[in-house]
Image: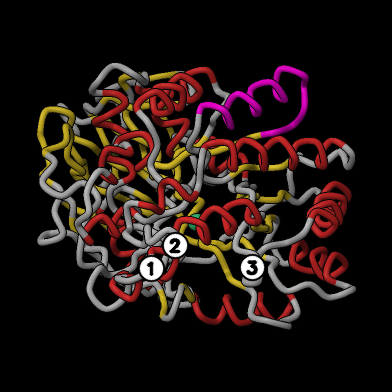
Amino acid sequence: MTSFVITNGTVVTEDGPIDTDILVDDGVIARLAPPGSARAESVIDASGLVVLPGGVDVHTHMDSPSGLGHTTDTHQTGTRAAAAGGTTTIIDFAPQSKGEPLPALYERWSEKMYGQCAVDYSFHATISSWYPSITTDMASLVNDGISSFKVYMAYKGAVMVDDRQLFEVLRASASQGSRICIHAENGDVIDAISQQLVDEGKTLPRYHKLARPSATEAEAVNRAIMIARLTDSAPYFVHLSTEEAVDRVQEARAEGLPVSAETCTHYLSLDDSVYDSDDFDVAKYVLTPPLRTRRDQARLWKALGEGDLSVVSSDHCPLCLVGQKDKGRHDFRDIPNGGPGVENRVLVTYSEGVAKGRLTLEKFAQVIATEPAKTFGLYPRKGAIRVGADADLTLLNPDSTTVLSAETQTQNVDYNLWEGWAVRGRIHSVYSRGVLVGSDGRHVGPDHHGQFIERAVRS
Ligand code: MN
């Protein structure tokens, strides 16, 4: 592969933003050199641009069973959208079928993603169908480079684990060095509240919010932390949305427990006022947990700044309003939960975070790339601009704007959570292992470019 140099840009390294040339050779960052000093076969002028580590999105659901159908992005269309939006590595969720042994799940999801992805990829194995030797089988996946698993504390009768199973999975992960992603909501309580709402005739999508009060998240986070501390494991909470839950994480971390957590783009940028309508379009925002108050949102930003939340993921779970979400027209419980965002995560977080003065450029790079890579065993190959790392680079124009819309998006779904927003910044170009995969907010390059990346256990 020809070597090239990126020059004149503001390069966000782990030591902060610096002026440096980046020399890329054979898909790898070969050298950081004083501005104007590097020589290569071609030169990319990044004047006026911010050069970031390629985004790492550790929470996507592509071609995944949901409600009565599947999420609408295949691994091909979803990773094109990732590339378009500045994300160069995804970790997808592989959902276990009923009775499916984990090694079979590994084979099935590996085959499904192989040759389909526009950017590099891995997946977490979701544990939702228990069998006696399942914790032993977890170890075989860890050996194959899948060093993380997911469990749900909600959706009883579908994917929910009970406390004993949660304990056993956490205990197994401690000796394996694997990491357990936890969807923390009290499923039993949510089911009871939902039933009561429907019994009272409250079936519109707006009631999705009332069915999942803040305490159902905080209680589950607290319970999981208490169970995890019995096992010396390192739980990772997905999609935290509330002040109360973040407070529980912050307290555990202050005690020195190895607890980490993410929030998602939509919790940082949208709030629960969207549910103040009887319109069925509110189903667009039926995602789980629901959008929360402005006060919760402020707590999430503070926690990102202070490190109690370390990752921003998309929880990309695209489901069309027409033909999928409208199955729940008469009962909000039948609306498949989820919303799109793999394409929008980097820019929306930049615009709401950096451009509004809530995050430094350095912290921004950490939460969209470095920390997700470190948490899930991809670092130092992924997640940072450093010598020896893959040349996964996202060049962003901070002086331009981007209008977000379903009309112009790459992700394959019939709406956009930020429809009509003119966000600060524009994705100028995206490189994966030195290959151009994104240009001016569009995917370019081959669909089969993405490679499976084996992930290390936690240190
Ligand atoms: Mn999810």
Mark positioned earlier in the residue sequence (1 or 2) = 2
Residue farthest front in this picture: 200
| Residue 344 rendering spot, x and y as whole percentages | 28, 48
User: How many C-alpha atoms fall within 10 Å of the one at disc 3: few (<14), some, or many (≥20)?
Assistant: many
Q: CA distance from mark 1 to mark 2?
A: 7 Å
- The total number of labels drawn is 3
Q: For marks 1 and 2, give the one nearer the viewer.
A: 2
Magenta segment, principal secondary structure? Answer: helix
Q: Image quadrant of residue 26?
A: bottom left
Mark positioned earlier in the residue sequence (2 or 3) = 3
Dot 2 amino acid type: Val
In contact (CB < 8 Å): disc 1 and disc 2: yes
Tell me if residue 32 can be seen. Answer: yes
User: How many C-alpha atoms fall within 10 Å of the one at disc 2: few (<14), some, or many (≥20)?
Assistant: some
**80, 240: nearer the viewer:** 240
210 w.r.t. 359: above or below: below
User: How many C-alpha atoms fall within 10 Å of the one at disc 1: few (<14), some, or many (≥20)?
Assistant: some
**302, 192: nearer the viewer:** 192
* Residue bounds of the magenta highlight: 243-259
Query: In the rendered view, does 20 fall on the left or right side of 302?
Result: left
Q: For marks 3 and 1, give the one nearer the viewer.
A: 1
Query: In the rendered view, does 29 fall on the left or right side of 38?
Result: right
Q: Secondary structure at mark 1?
A: loop
Q: Which residue is mark 3?
A: 159
Q: Is residue 152 magenta?
A: no
Q: Which residue is mark 2?
A: 198
Q: CA distance from mark 2 to mark 3?
A: 22 Å
Query: Does the numbered disc 1 mark a residue whose Cβ is under 8 Å from ligand 1?
Result: no
Dot 1 amino acid type: Asp
Q: Residue at x 63, y 55 (%)?
A: 187
Q: Secondary structure at mark 3?
A: loop
**137, 190: nearer the viewer:** 190
